[in-house]
Image (tube, grey):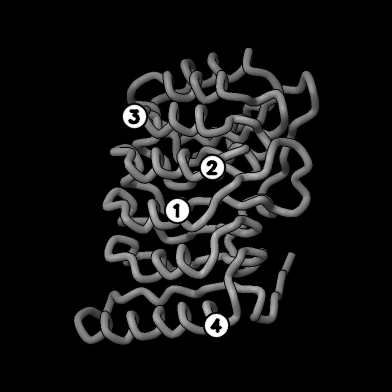
Amino acid sequence: TGQSGCWWNLYIIVSQVGLESMTQSGALLRFEGATQAGLEPFLSGAPSNLPLRVLLAGEQWGPAACRILAAAPAGIDLRADYLRGAPIGDQGLELLAGSPALDSVRSLGIERCGLTDLGLQALAKSAHVSELRELYLCNRVGIESGSLNQISDDGAIALAASANLGRLEKLDLWNTQVGDRGLEAIVASPYLVQLSSLTAWETRLTMEGAYRIKALAKERWERSRKLTAAAVYCWILTDYDDRTITY
């Protein structure tokens, strides 16, 4: 998409059963495979001087795949990790959250993977997410496998209270159960000061709540820019705005 930063329009996803894909694009080594049998050797054999991108899409990727990722060799440079329609649940996310494999991850997508607020609370407490810039937790249109992420205000509030997410720039909560309370906590967070894009399409945000958090974002930016030229304005995408998508 245009403003929402949705990664799924930027890559061709190879997920045919039996097909493994390990390609080098520029300086990025990518894994887009269909079986767990290919993931472990990819991680163990990846050159230490190349950043990695892993995309796991479909029902075949469960908590066991997260266990493989969590046990990745020390020193790998995993820059992007995407799970799409994979039924990893809170168990899988907790495995990832507790692993140093996330230390280098800049972009993390866990879309329609059966998460609840408990999984988000584990992620928020993780000491391994300090480099994270993009976090996609949505139930995006077009994903048919997996179970919906059941994320509510409590999960959003846990993210807002995380001192470990201070570098986060993009947060996608599209088609979740987060409402006014959770989204206001995100915008008002003393830790998420670098957040520049918040996608809240098809959430439980009310019109009054949308006006309130947009006003809060503007007030925060105006207050911050008096102190620093590096102040960040948070663009909030809601159902009460014109939705423009470019391909």
Q: Which mark sits nearer the N-terminus, 2 or 1?
A: 2
Residue on which disc 1 sits:
154
The residue located at (62%, 64%) in the rendering is: 203
Decide: few, some or many residues near mark 2? Use Cα within 10 Å; few <14, some 14-19, many ≥20.
some
What is the distance, in whole Å, between disc 3 and disc 1 at their CAs? 26 Å
What is the distance, in whole Å, between disc 4 and disc 1 at their CAs? 20 Å
- Identify the amino acid type marked 1: Asp
Judge by depth and name the residue closer to the eye, 119 or 191: 119
Tell us which disc is closer to us: 3 or 1. 1
For the residue labelled by badge 2, is the local secondary structure a helix, a strand or a loop?
loop
Q: Which mark sits nearer the N-terminus, 3 or 4?
A: 3
Tell us which disc is closer to us: 3 or 2. 2
List x then y, in percent, for residue 165. Answer: 34, 52
In the rendering, which numbered label is found on residue 116?
2
Which residue ends up furthest to the left in the rendered image? 227
Q: Are marks 2 and 1 in contact (CB under 8 Å)?
A: no
The residue located at (80%, 28%) in the rendering is: 16
List x then y, in percent, for residue 155. Answer: 46, 51
* Vertical comparison of 83 with 223: above or below: above
**Based on the displayed image, in which of its 4 quarters is residue 75 positioned?**
top left
Q: Which mark sits nearer the N-terminus, 4 or 1?
A: 1
State which quarter of the image contains the C terminus.
Answer: bottom right
